[in-house]
Image (cartoon, coloured by chain):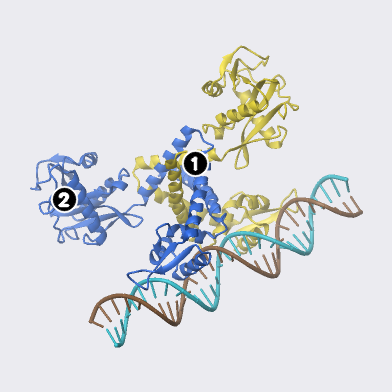
Chain colours: A blue, B yellow, C cyan, D brown
DNA sequence: CCAGTTTCCTGACTAAGGTCAGGCAATGGA
DNA sequence: TCCATTGCCTGACCTTAGTCAGGAAACTGG
């Protein structure tokens, strides 16, 4: 990790912090504390439950309550009961609250415009592209991969998306019964493990490994959500799974894949996997790979 | 200005704001309010005059004074009189202040490291490159070009740097006497104008225009500081000078240049200038350009 | 229907950030 | 020499942000 890179990042942070400071000033230029402005923003056009607001903004319940009273007094939001639970409450913007939100939106747009205006068209394109790249890579760095119970709600959600995608991409379709999705405890220690990747708490990918015998592990269920692709996440996942395989005592990892999943194949080949003969009877597999650890 | 670009910028701002929030938390993890930490940082290893601190951090004089007292009480800074003006005071870090600053530095480094660590080497390079691009282009957008008295201190500074650079690049050297640096009021209205480009208050470039006759203007003294090159600043400057020339009544602008200044020539040609015959006796010029407005 | 939990509200309190007016000492120009 | 200005300090005051404890109402499982 060269020092020049770290210096670059710190310099970027400083430069951007100053800009962000300007952005916060623009929020304050409407004469409302930042906290209230953020709350208004978070309630949004469709409203929000107080519990959700508390969680998203990380607010104390008392503090949130008081800010909502203040916004109510200004006539910007109205807080009513929720249908399903009379304890829970739901905040929505009033007519003037929506107008205020629109005003904040316009301010943000102006700010963005003023950043583009002095630049030449070519420079504008470059700025926007570089911002997209920074955002994307910072998101990639923020993805956390952790072991997880394969029966947890998030794990099931990921596996469901995985199956749906596989089904849509296989030319012959995909039948969950045949595709051996039954799990039991094969993907939990000591037989195997299940990894879940999260970005800001939301699952964005998964992968599993299990022992076929004491010295051989099999990698399965590798999936990355479409929004998180192109960030090198699959590679990180693969490395973590190999690490676990080694930890479980395996000397060799193997896996199967389908010719429709081209990115997967090129990943495996880049990571040193070599094609081998069929080693299982998975009806949906048509390529088999193996790698010594 | 497409909406997609504005949306991109706003999304970038949001994403980065969250990161910056994390950064501020790391500042607070040393149990000192953010304001004091920033002040410590701004005083830096070489110390700083209180007036400069007030300006850089945008602080009220009373507030700054109190924070300095607090840092003094913690034994981190010492504030002494300045040599040249006994009213003004100068803050420096004590031994333990320097240690504290080093601790903050280490924290920032760790933060930057943790951003790079999850990424592949290729992704790290891309992130750092994209950050540099964003920083550079945001700086370019923050450059303000304004008309200025060519005798002001900042203008003189820029002209001095311009002359120094020209002298170092011309194969035969450059003699200010022969190079017609005498100005009088030729670069002030209504005979002409002088533009100064500033980035965060610091001059980073200049350019001048004057009328040769009622219908012809000449552009002179175009210079961009080396740190601000490659941002399209010269082009903006040129456009502004042409605008002023039009405003002064000119139908044609002309200029001379030296073959050593290759970037300048390609800029002029890109902007529609055509090479013409020698129209003055500037001993340092060997190319002459002209453009109809 | 009762006990325990959840959801929100209220009051009391604290720290941090920030502003304003006045004052003192040093400075500099008339 | 005098007076306006500059640079800093101090006291008084205010808002914003945030925490904590307790309480009322609604809900849930037994």
Labels 1 and 2 positioned on one and the same chain: no
Q: Residue furthest top?
A: B277
On residue A218, the disc is 2
SS at mark 1 in the image: helix
Snapshot quadrant of residue A235: top left
Mark 1–mark 2 distance (CA, rounded to whole Å): 45 Å
Label 1 marks which chain's residue?
B
Q: Nearer the viewer, mark 1 or mark 2?
A: 1
Residue B163 visible in the displayed image: no
Name the foreground residue: D20 vs A22: A22
Label 2 marks which chain's residue?
A
Residue B196 sits above or below residue B74 on the image: above
Q: Would you say the residues marked 1 and 2 are in contact, meaning their CB atoms lie under 8 Å apart?
A: no
SS at mark 2 in the image: strand
Q: Residue furthest front?
A: A95
Residue A251, how many percent across, how many down?
17, 49
Name the foreground residue: B40 vs B272: B272
Q: Is residue B82 left or right of residue B18?
A: right
Q: Is residue A228 left or right of residue A119?
A: left
For the residue carrying disc 2, how many other residues have a C-alpha within 10 Å: few (<14), some (14-19), or many (20+)? many
Residue at 55% in and 22% down:
B268
Q: Is residue A132 left or right of residue A72?
A: left
Residue at 59% in and 63% down:
B74
Residue B44, how many percent across, how many down?
58, 51
On residue A34, the disc is none
For the residue carrying disc 1, how many other residues have a C-alpha within 10 Å: few (<14), some (14-19), or many (20+)? many
Residue behind mark 1: B135
Residue D29, how many percent across, how many down?
25, 77
Residue B262, how many percent across, how many down?
54, 21
Residue A93 visible in the displayed image: yes
Q: Quadrant of the C terminus of chain B?
A: top right
Residue A224 sits above or below residue C21 on the image: above
């Amino acid at each position: 990790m060269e020092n020049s890179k770290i210096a670059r990042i710190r310099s970027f942070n400083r430069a951007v912090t100053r800009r962000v400071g300007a952005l916060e000033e623009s929020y304050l230029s409407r004469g409302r504390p930042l906290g209230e402005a953020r709350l208004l923003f978070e309630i949004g056009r469709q409203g929000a439950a107080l519990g959700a607001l508390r969680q998203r903004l990380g607010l104390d319940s008392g503090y949130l309550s008081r800010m909502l009273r203040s916004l109510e007094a200004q006539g910007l939001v109205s807080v009513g009961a929720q249908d399903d639970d009379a304890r829970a409450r739901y905040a929505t913007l009033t007519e003037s609250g929506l107008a205020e939100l629109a005003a904040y939106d316009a301010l943000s747009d102006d700010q963005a415009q003023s950043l583009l205006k002095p630049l030449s068209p070519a420079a504008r394109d470059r700025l926007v592209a570089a911002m997209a790249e920074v955002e994307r890579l910072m998101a990639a760095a923020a993805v956390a991969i952790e072991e997880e119970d394969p029966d947890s709600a998030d794990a099931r959600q990921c596996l469901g998306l995985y199956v749906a995608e596989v089904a849509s991409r296989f030319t012959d379709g995909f039948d969950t019964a045949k595709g051996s999705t039954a799990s039991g405890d094969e993907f939990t220690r000591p037989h195997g493990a299940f990894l879940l990747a999260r970005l800001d708490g939301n699952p964005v990918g998964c992968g599993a490994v299990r022992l076929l015998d004491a010295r051989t592990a099999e990698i399965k269920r590798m999936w990355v959500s479409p929004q998180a692709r192109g960030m090198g996440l699959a590679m990180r996942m693969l490395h973590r799974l190999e690490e676990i395989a080694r930890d479980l005592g395996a000397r060799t990892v193997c896996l199967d894949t389908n010719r429709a999943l081209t990115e997967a194949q090129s990943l495996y080949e880049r990571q040193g996997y070599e094609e081998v003969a069929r080693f299982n009877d998975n009806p949906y597999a048509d390529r088999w790979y193996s790698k010594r650890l």
